[in-house]
Amino acid sequence: MITSRITAFVIAVGFFGIAGLAPAAKEKAATEAGTSEYAKGVKLLDGQQYDQAVTEFTKAILANSKQPAFYEGRGFAYLALQRFQEASDDFSKAIELSPKDERAYLGRAQVLLQEKAYQPALADTEKALELKPGDVNATKLRGFAELGLSQWDKAAADFTTVIQNKPDDLLSYDRRALAYRGMKNFDAAIADYTFIL
């Protein structure tokens, strides 16, 4: 029950990494072959035209197979299409090419959460936080992984951190309430659920 709710909420988040993380890599690709295809892919990704985005990112990769941003972009498009193996492969390739870029770790963590592979997802979020301490998206994804592993106290702490940074993030209140329920702290869970209403 809990794992299916985690999966549903990760999907409901709308893969917050898709719009927020993929375009951030634009500047990396600015002067290299495949840039125009990459830019088209980003626009298509933002416009939720995922199949076409995959095509453009693939063209960019064919023009320059050494650019991690191209693999990240295609990975996020595959993630949106729920083609998890291809997404994972692309994020892993981006990590291979640029092991200090946290976005690929966050993308792969989202794939792993969809596959209910919570321990490896936790490891990827930890690596992302090592590379970019305090990243709210990484903290939120780590909270999802901790919920899946029944690490209630850690999940509650992570969602509290997210709420402190994004007080309007109702999903984090809901997930923290779930963690509180796991901890048998029903008063705190009720308070979070009441806040949502």
Image (spheres, rainbow, N blue to C red):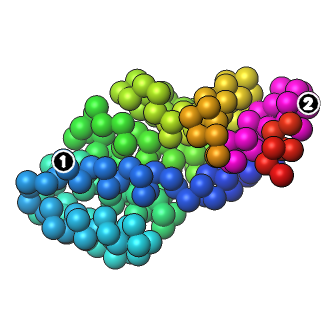
Name the image quarter holding residue 133.
Answer: top left
Residue appearing at x 29%, y 73% in the figure:
55
Which residue corresponds to the image point at 77% horizontal and 33% vertical from the top-left? 179
Quadrant position of residue 132: top left
Q: Check disc 1 and give the amino acid type.
A: Lys
Q: What type of secondary structure mainly makes up the magenta span?
A: helix
The one nearer the camera, 88 or 72, is 72
Say which mark, if any, is on residue 28: 1
Query: Is residue 140 visible in this depiction of the protein?
Result: yes
Q: Horizontal placement of 189 versus 34: left or right? A: right
Question: Given the image, on which type of amino acid does mark 2 rest?
Answer: Asp
Q: Is residue 37 left or right of residue 164?
A: left
Mark nearest the camera among 2 and 1 is: 2
Mark 2 residue crowding within 10 angstroms, few (<14) / some (14–19) / many (20+):
few
* Magenta-drawn stretch contains 171: yes
How many angstroms separate mark 2 from mark 1 (CA)? 48 Å
Residue 138 counted in the magenta span? no
Rendered location of residue 136, percent (x, y): 51, 36
Q: Which residues are magenta?
A: 170-190
Front one among 172 and 6: 172
Q: Position of residue 77 (x, y in %)?
A: 40, 63
| Residue, disc 2 | 187
Residue 142 in the image: state x and y as whole percent: 57, 34
Q: Residue 65's spot in the image, x, y percent?
A: 16, 54
* Residue 16 in the image: above or below residue 149: below
